[in-house]
């Protein structure tokens, strides 16, 4: 996994949109949605959209940076 943008972008926010997660992780939105559906990416459904906790994105950045 390659972190494309700094998770600092989400500072002060609790959740990010699917499109924001896709941009940061360097995936397309379909891949992120599939990860959410498969339970690989934690998300909360808000109406018909999903929101991913920014804490999870930051944790992925730390894991990726430590590797």
Image: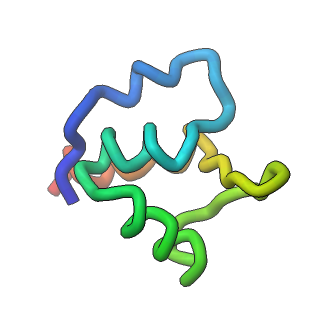
Residue 11, position in %: x, y? 53, 18
Residue 21 appears in the figure: yes
Residue lying at the far top in this picture: please name it. 12
Residue 43, position in %: x, y? 66, 58
Residue 32 or residue 2, whichever sits in front: 32
Residue 18 or residue 1, whichever sits in front: 18
Residue lying at the far front in this picture: please name it. 48
Quadrant of residue 42 in the image? Answer: bottom right
Residue lying at the far right in this picture: please name it. 47
Q: In the figure, 63 relative to 10: above or below?
A: below
Taking 62 as reference, is 54 left or right?
Answer: right
Residue 66, position in %: x, y? 20, 50
Tell me the quarter of the image containing the N terminus.
bottom left
Residue 58 appears in the figure: no
Number of marks in picture: 0
Q: In the figure, 24 relative to 32: above or below?
A: above
Taking 28 as reference, is 17 left or right?
Answer: right
Quadrant of residue 31 in the image? Answer: bottom left
Tell me the quarter of the image containing the C terminus.
bottom left
What residue do we see at 47% from left, 73% from top?
35
Residue 6 or residue 46, whichever sits in front: 46
What residue do we see at 26% from left, 30% from top?
5
Quadrant of residue 24 in the image? Answer: top left
What residue do we see at 59% from left, 78% from top?
37
């Amino acid at each position: 996994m390659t972190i494309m943008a700094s998770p600092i972008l989400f500072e002060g926010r609790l959740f990010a949109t699917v499109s924001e997660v896709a941009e940061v992780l360097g995936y397309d939105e379909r891949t992120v949605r599939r990860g959410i559906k498969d339970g690989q990416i934690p998300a909360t459904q808000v109406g018909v959209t999903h929101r991913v906790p920014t804490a999870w994105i930051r944790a992925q950045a730390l894991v990726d940076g430590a590797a």
